Image: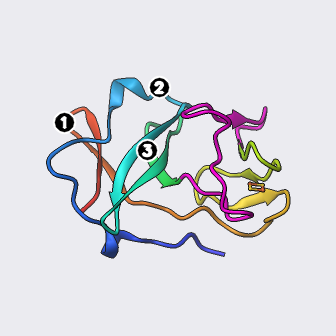
């Protein structure tokens, strides 16, 4: 299943980036707050080894819980999968698709972001 794209429903953040790119090392995950559909939502940011940054709602498709075990603290498998701290669903970090666990085949909800001026921004 392809991740759901919510770009058309995004509300442009009022001139503020989500995070400085320097705060997101290659391979790292971070939790930030961003406006999605006019609501402040917790987002998971990930920067891959090539430097591409992706974002998803910090909501597990299994039971709707946050993925992190404490704010901004994410479990990562030795294969580099993002692991939900609640029941262990494991998500690949390109499409956000669950590869193992109770919601196998479902995907995190993607939130379009872009990198400019040394920071990560919601994509308009
Ligand atoms: S809430 Fe994430 S695996 Fe159950």
From the image, tell me which residue sits under label 2: 25
As rendered, which of 75 and 94 lies closer to the eye? 75
Residue 35 part of the magenta-drawn span: no
Image x and y of residue 33, in percent: 39, 45
Splitting the image into 4 quarters, where does residue 37 fall? bottom left
> Do residues under tags 3 and 2 come within 8 Å of each other at their CB atoms?
no
Few, some or many residues within 10 Å of mark 2 (<14, 14–19, 20+): some
In the rendered image, the quadrant that contains the N terminus is bottom right
Tell me the element at label 3.
Answer: strand
Task: Give the residue drawn at x 27%, y 36%.
Answer: 119
Tell me the element at label 1.
Answer: loop
Q: Main secondary structure of the magenta part?
A: loop
In the picture provided, is 94 more to the left or to the right than 114?
right
Task: Give the residue drawn at x 78%, y 58%.
Answer: 99
Task: Give the residue drawn at x 43%, y 60%.
Answer: 111
Tell me the element at label 2.
Answer: loop
Task: Give the residue drawn at x 68%, y 36%.
Answer: 69
Mark carried by residue 53: 3
Query: Which image quarter has ligand 1?
Result: bottom right
Few, some or many residues within 10 Å of mark 1 (<14, 14–19, 20+): few
From this view, report whether residue 63 is shown above or below residue 24: below
What separation in Å lies between label 3 and label 2 (alpha carbons)? 10 Å
Few, some or many residues within 10 Å of mark 3 (<14, 14–19, 20+): many
Residue 81 part of the magenta-drawn span: yes
Splitting the image into 4 quarters, where does residue 39 fall? bottom left
Q: Residue furthest left?
A: 15
From this view, report whether residue 1 is shown above or below residue 103: below
User: For the magenta stretch, what is the residue range?
Assistant: 58-82
From the image, tell me which residue sits under label 1: 117
Does label 1 point to a residue whose CB lies under 8 Å from ligand 1? no
Mark carried by residue 54: none
- Badge 2 or badge 1: first in the primary sequence: 2
């Amino acid at each position: 299943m392809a991740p759901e794209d919510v770009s058309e429903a995004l509300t442009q953040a009022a001139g503020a980036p989500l995070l400085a790119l320097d705060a997101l090392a290659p391979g790292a995950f971070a939790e930030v707050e961003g406006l999605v559909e006019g609501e402040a939502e917790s987002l998971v940011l990930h920067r891959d080894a090539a430097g591409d940054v992706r974002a998803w709602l910090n909501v597990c498709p299994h039971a709707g819980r946050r993925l992190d075990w404490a704010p901004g603290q994410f479990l990562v498998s030795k294969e580099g999968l993002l692991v939900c701290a609640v029941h262990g669903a494991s998500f690949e970090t390109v499409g956000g698709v669950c590869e193992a666990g109770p919601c196998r085949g479902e995907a995190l909800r993607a939130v379009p972001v872009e990198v400019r001026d040394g920071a990560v921004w919601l994509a308009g």
